[in-house]
Amino acid sequence: MPVTSFSSPLVGRNDELARLAGVLERARGGEARAVLIAGDAGVGKTRMLDEAAGRAALAGMTVLTGHCVDLGDVGLPYLPFTEILGLLASDERFAPVLTGHPVAERLLGGGGDGGRLQLFEGMAGLLADLADVAPLLLVLEDLHWADQSSRDLLRFLLSRGVLQRPAGGAPTHRLALFASYRADDLHRRHPLRPLLAELVRLPAVERLELRPLADAEVTRLVQGLRERPLPEATVRRIVERAEGNAFYAEELVAATDTEAGGVPSGLADVLLIRFEQLSDTAQQVLRTAAVAGRRVEHDLLRDAVGLPEDDLETALREAVGRQLLVPGDRDTYSFRHALAREAVYADLLPGERARLHGAFARLLAGRGHRAETAAERAHHYRESHDLAEALAASLEAADHAQRIGAPAEELRHLEAALDMWSAVDPAARPSDDRVTLTLRASAAAAHAGEAHRAVSLTRAALAGIDQDADSELAARVRYTLAGNLIDVDNLTAAFQYSSEALALIPADPPSRTWVWAAATHVTAARHVGENEIALRVAREALRVAEQLEAKDARADLIISLAALESGGRGTSEGRGRITEARELAHAAGNASVEMRALFNLAIGSYEAGDLEAALPWLAEGLDRARRAGLLSAAYPRAMRHLQLVVLYTLGRWDECLRAAAGDAELPALSGYAAGPALYVALARGDLTAADRARALLQGPFDWMATLVAGISLTEAAALHGDAETAVEQLRSTVKALTDDAGTRPDVTVRLAARALSAVADTASGLRLTGDEAGAGRWSATADQLVELARHAAARGEDGTPQGPEGQAWLARAEAEWARAVSGPDAAAWEKAVAAFGFGDPYELARCRLRFAEALVAADRREEAAAEATAARETAVRLGATLLLDQADQLIRRGRLAASPATATGASPLTAREQDVLRLLALGRSNRQIGEELFISGKTASVHVSNILAKLGAASRTEAVAVAYREGLIAPE
C-alpha cells in the first residue's frame, strides 16, 4: 500500500490493544500465547501491531518482525523467518544464541544438513533460547501471502514447538506470537484457510478480528491527520466514504487539497488490482453493477448486462469468491466496499457510463413508476442526460421523502430539481414555479437541521421574485425568511423581513398568509424587545385566526401570548395556555407548532425549578418529532439539549452520558448533545474535555455550540485556577451570544459565577502573600463581573427576572464576589446553598463546600464538618473526582473529620475499611491492597481516601499513626 506522508494517530482500538496487552503480560510470565489478527486491507492491522510492539519493547521484550510478500507464483521459502534471522544476525547482542543453532546459518543460505523436521525443531529451539534470555514477541505480517514452507513452519511452532506445554503443566516459554492476515483476500480455495481453521482450535491460539472503525472514531482519525481543521461537511463526506477503513480515510484526507471528487488516484490503483485479476466477463458484470450503485438486484443486473444466465452466474461466483461482491437478501449483490464500486465506476468510458445509466433508467421505468424507485430513476436519467425525465423523477422522489418523514432526502431531491430547472424546456417542467419550489426546499432544509442552508435557499427565493409577482407569494417568502433568520439568531434582519411581509398583504380580507406573517412578526418582535408591537399584532392575529378556524395558527399565537400576557411560561397560568395551544396544534396535525408547544411546556417547568416535570414533556416532544421525521428540526434539537441539561442538573449523570452518546451519531445535533457530557467530563477530572469544547467552535457560527463551548472553557479555566482566561472566556462568550438588541444571554449569570470563582481564588491567594495591590486589582474585576450577573439575572428572556436556576447562580456569584473582595462570607454562602436547593445536587455540593470553608474561617467547626461531609457524599455519588479531592483536602486541613472512635469505643470505619487499614499499616500499595482483597486498585484508592477523611489524616502514614493511637489496629 502507498505510504502516506503523515503519521496516523491510533483511534478506536482500545479494547483490542488491551487484549493484546493481556497476552503479552501472560507471555512475560512464562505462558506462551499466539494471536491471529484478521481484518480487511487498510483497516489498521499494521498500525495496531506497531503500537503493541512498541509497548512490548518498553516492557523489556525483544520484538522480531517478519513480513510475507506477494511474489505471485514464485514464492521464496521461509521468507518471514529468514527476515527475522537476518535481524538477529545483524545484532551482536544475539550472537551467542545464534552460535548454538545451525538452523540460522541454514536458512540464511550458509548450507547445512538435515531434513525439514530438524529445521523446524531447530527454529523452535532458537526461539525458545531467545525467550530464555528475554521475553520475546514474534510478529508475522500479511500471512495471506505466506509461502507453503512458512505456513508449515508456523503450524509446527504453534502446535508442537514453542507453544507446546510440557508434560506436568510446567510453564512453556516467555514468548508471544502475533500474526496478521487480510480477511478479504481469503477466497474459498485460499491455502491459508485450512491452516487457520486448524490453528484456532489450539488452546494457546486465539483469533482477533479488527472490525471497521465506528463513524465517531473515523471522525477523530480524520481530525487528527491535519494540523488545520477540515470543514465539517468534508469530514462527514470522508467518514461516509471510508466506511470504517483507516487507510481509505487517510488517503481521502491526503487528497482533499488536490482532488475535486472521485477516488484519489493512488487509492484507485489499490482498489482496482483485485478487479483486474478477474476474467473479462466478470469485469463486464462488475462495471454494469457499478453503474447500478452499491447494491443491485439480480434480475435488474441480468437484464442490464445482457448475458446468458449461466455466464452471469459464473461471473458472479468469481466476483463473490474474490470478495468484490457480497450476496445479500432478496437476490441482491453489493460491493464489499463503496470505494471499490467508485473506483470501478470511475474507470468506465464516458459513453459506456451514459449508455448503462440509460439502460437502468428504462428498466426501472418499465417496472412502473413506484415511489420507492423514483430516486434511482432520477439518478440514472440525469447521468444519461435525459434531464426532463430526471426532473420529474426528482420531484416524485421528493414527494416520497416528505411522506415518509425524511427531510434531508427531500432537500437533496429538491436541490437536484432546482439545479436542472433552467436546463429543461419550460413545456416539460411541472406546474410549480421555481420560487415555490425553492421555498419548499428551504422548509426541508429547516426540518433537516440545515438552518444556514434554509436561509440561503429562502434568500434565493426572494431574489427570484419579479416586481410584478403575486403579493401573497412575496409575503410568504419574506416571513419564511424571517423565521429561518430567527433560527440562526440574525434577529434584526428577521424583524425587518417580517415587517415587510406584514406590509405586503392586508389583514382584510382575512387570509392564512396574513395570519402566519403576523405570527412570525410576533416572534421576531419579541426577540428584538418590541413587546408592545408583539402584543398588539398577536391579539389582532389571534382574532383573525379564530375567524378563519386556523387551529395551528391559533396555537402558535397562543404560545407567544402566554409569554406576553400571563407572566411567562414559568407560571401555571402560562403553562395552562400553552397546553391549550398544544391540543389545538395536535388537532390540526401541525407537528412543528405542536413541538414548539411541548418545548415551551418543558422549558417553562425548568425555569420554574420543577425539573422532574420537564422530563415527560421532553419525552413526548421527542417522540412526536421522531414520528414526524423531524428530529433534526430546531425545536427537537433544543428539546434534546434541554433533556440532557435536566438529567445533568438532577445529578443523573450516567443516564445523561448514555443519552448524549446516542445523539452524537447525528452530526446536526453534536453541539446540542455535547454540552452536558462535557460538563460531566470536567467534573470527573477529564480536563481534555476543553479540547473537545474548542472543536465545537470550528466552522460557521453556531449559537448552541458557542454557548456549550463558552460554559465548558470558562469552567475548565476556573478548575485550572486561571482567572485571566476564565474572565476572557466569559466576556468573549457573552459578546458572541448577545443579540442585536443588546440583550445578554441568560447564561451570563452562570458564566459570571464560574469566572468569579477563579477570580476569588486568585485574589485570596494574593491576599495571603501580602500582595494587597494585586488583590485589589482582581477585586475591581470582581465588581464588574457581579454587576454583569446582577443585570442578567434581573432581565431574563421575556424581560422578567430569571427563575430559580438563574437566581441560584446569582447567589453564588454574590458569594464568590464577597470572597474575592473581603474573604469568605458564611451568610452569603448559606444563601447560595439554600438557592440551589431547587434540585441541582452538584452545584449545591460545591456551594456547601464553600460554605464549610467560610464556617471554618468563622470557627464554626461542627457546622463546617456537616456541610463538608454532605458535599463529599454527593461527590462520591456523582463520581465528581475534583470535588471529592477538594472536600478531602478541606476535611484534612480543617480537621473536620469525626472523632476516630465514638463514645462507645466503636470504630468509625466500615469492615472493608478496617481490612484496608490493616494492609496500609503493613506498607502495602493500592495495587497490592486490591490484589489481597480481590478488589481493583481504584476501589482500594477510594477506601484509602475515605480512611484519611474519617481519621482527619493528611497522609497514609499519619492515618496509620492515628489508628494506632486510637486503638483501631494493633501492631503486627
Image: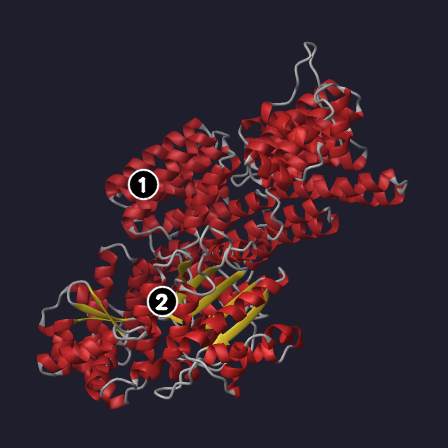
Amino acid identity at mark 2: Ala
Residue at the disc numbered 2: 461
> On screen, 500 above or below 887?
below
Q: Which quarter shows the N terminus?
A: bottom left
Q: Residues within 10 Å of mark 2 (few under 14, many from 20)?
A: many
| Relative to 361, 798 lies left or right | right
Residue beneath the point at 50% across and 75% down: 66
- Give x and y (percent) for residue 480: 37, 57
- Give x and y (percent) for residue 899: 72, 18
Residues at marks 1 and 2 touching, judged by CB atoms closer than 8 Å = no
From the viewer's side, name the closer residue of 145 and 389. Answer: 145
| Relative to 342, 880 lies left or right | right
What is the total number of numbered labels drawn onto the structure image?
Answer: 2
Locate residue 435: give its quadrant: bottom left
| Relative to 192, 266 lies left or right | right
Residue at the disc numbered 1: 554
Locate residue 896: give its quadrant: top right
From the viewer's side, name the closer residue of 786 and 711. Answer: 711
Amino acid identity at mark 1: Arg
Mark 2, secondary structure of its residue = helix
| Spatial CA span between label 1 and label 2 | 27 Å
In the displayed image of the protein, which residue is found farthest to the right?
Answer: 770
